[in-house]
Image (cartoon, helix red, strand yellow):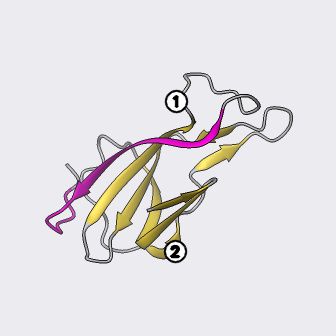
Amino acid sequence: LAFRSTTIKVNGSAQIVSANFDTLKTAPTSGYAAGSVGTWYDYAGEPTHLISPQLGKVILIKTVDNKYAKIQVLNYYQGAPAIPNGLTDTPRYYTFRFVLQPDGTTSLQ
């Protein structure tokens, strides 16, 4: 994974699905695209310029060696403030949770 501003790049392929992170137990075997992850956030624009992870969105990754992972971005600001301020909080500090399935199965438990 590579992070640059709001762009997340993968060395394999990825897709974003609408799902609950905890109940998503199996990765799909199709629907992945190489390159960057799609839009995982909402941008508030003026006057707040706040970047907020989209609720209910999970990033699914298929690695180059055919392993699967799921990621949920929780926060984009340093220290993961409960109520971030897009004007004063330091951005580009991802807080996320993930599950990697190292055995190559699609099970994400």
Q: Image quadrant of residue 83?
A: top right
Give the secondary structure at mark 1: loop
Is 106 placed above or below 46 here?
Answer: below
Q: Residue at x 19, y 58 (%)?
A: 107
Marks 1 and 2 in Cβ contact (< 8 Å):
no
**Residue 34 - label:** none
Is 88 placed above or below 55 here?
Answer: above
The amino acid at mark 2 is: Gly
Is 90 placed above or below 18 here?
Answer: above
Give the secondary structure at mark 2: strand
- Left or right: 45, with 80 as reference point: right
Q: Residue at x 81, y 41 (%)?
A: 45
Q: Quadrant of the N terminus?
A: bottom left
Which one is in front, 95 or 17? 95
Say which residue label 1 marks: 80
Q: Residue at x 55, y 41 (%)?
A: 93
**Residue 35 - label:** 2
Considering the whole magenta stretch, tell me its main secondary structure: strand
Report crowding for label 2: few under 14, some 14 to 19, many 20 or more residues within 10 A (C-alpha). Answer: few
Residue 50 covered by magenta stretch: no
Q: Which residues are magenta?
A: 90-107
- Left or right: 50, with 38 as reference point: right
- Tell me the distance, in whole angstroms, between the alpha carbons under discs 1 and 2: 27 Å
Q: Position of residue 30 (x, y in %)?
A: 36, 74
**Earlier-in-chain disc, 1 versus 2:** 2
Residue 95 covered by magenta stretch: yes
- Extreme residue toward the top, this view: 82
The amino acid at mark 1 is: Ala
